[in-house]
Amino acid sequence: QLTAWVNGRFLPLEQATVHIEDRGFQFADGVYEVIACFGGRFLDLKPHLERLERSCSAIDITLPRTLDELSELVEQAYQHNPFEHAMVYIQVTRGVAPRSHLAQQNMVPSLIITVRDLPMPTAEKLEHGVSAITMPDIRWKRCDIKSIALLASVIGKQEASRHGADEGFWLDGQGHVLEGCATNCFAVIDGILVTHPLDHQVLGGITRDMALRVARANAIKVEERAWKLTESGLSECLMSSTTNAVMPVCHIDGKTIGDGSPGPVAIRLRQLMLDEFEALKL
Ligand code: PLP
């Protein structure tokens, strides 16, 4: 029996409902986080909650709890749903009001927390890497906010799936790879780990941060700059997310990256990240 936090209490998931005039439902007026828990240990809980606070503040919602209270609630939610490996979903919306674009002042935000089993990457994916397609970026201009308005990402994922690919990579007008539908993207170019800089076109991924930090600490050169798949010297692609750590991406738009199998930087960086959080070692 799954248990969710909704409207200030824990309830069986089936009974955990929100009002039809919640602005999250009618306007996607809200933000969210996904946090991974491995063997009962949360990975980067604090940075996730701090990002939630930043997302809220970017759209002028006051988090209904302190970060300490939220942290406690997340732990409790996990105790109610103690999967070996879990993903915790937190959503904050502006709250309930008669439908009007202009929000009322002093609304009471809705806070929900759900916990689900976290699927681990299959041995096949780890061995052969994953695949992606590229697509023109049709999203809004504030991708740095972790907004629940995810229609473009839903479309992108469907398009990727239709092509038998795992992820869709957004390209800007010049053909630079920005990020994936639910991942940050990296390339290895002339031996340097390259990823798009933080700006309004990408989400500041918590796993992106970890990957860059771990890479730097282990003498893997890092550059945050715009990059293209067509650059000479590109030997590997990777993607990062809370639910995947870093994954090698070996096929993009049906073309082989490098020799078509996970490259040395992807394999090494993944292992270094797993070592850093040793409970991830499976
Ligand atoms: N970029 C986008 C658009 C995302 O939706 C996500 C995660 O959902 C990420 C990047 C990866 O972020 P994180 O590493 O914090 O999970």
Image (cartoon, rainbow, N blue to C red):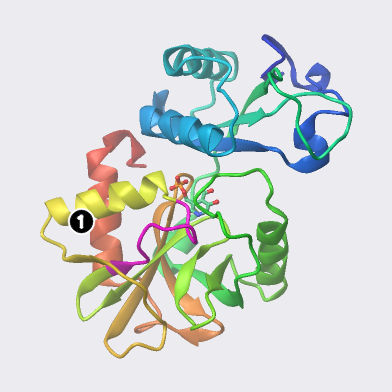
Question: Residue 4 appears at what percent x and percent y?
Answer: 68, 19
Quadrant of res 268: bottom left
Residue density around tag 1, few if under 14, some if 14–19, many if 20 or more, within 10 Å: many
Question: Is 210 left, or right, of 50 in this rendering?
Answer: left
Quadrant of res 38: top left
Span highlighted in magenta in the image: 194-203
Residue type marked 1: Ala
Quadrant of res 104: top right
Residue at x 37%, y 33% (from the top left corner): 47
The reply to whether residue 87 is visible in this rendering is: no
Question: Is 23 left, or right, of 83 in this rendering?
Answer: right
Q: Which residue is mark 1?
A: 215
Above or below, comparing residue 266 to residue 218 in the picture: below
What secondary structure do most residues of the magenta stretch adopt? Answer: loop
Question: Residue 34 appears at what percent x and percent y?
Answer: 53, 37
- In reply to whether residue 235 is colored magenta, the answer given is no
Question: Residue 150 appears at what percent x and percent y?
Answer: 68, 52
Q: Quadrant of the C terminus?
A: top left
Q: Quadrant of the N terminus?
A: top right
Residue at x 58%, y 76% (from the top left corner): 133
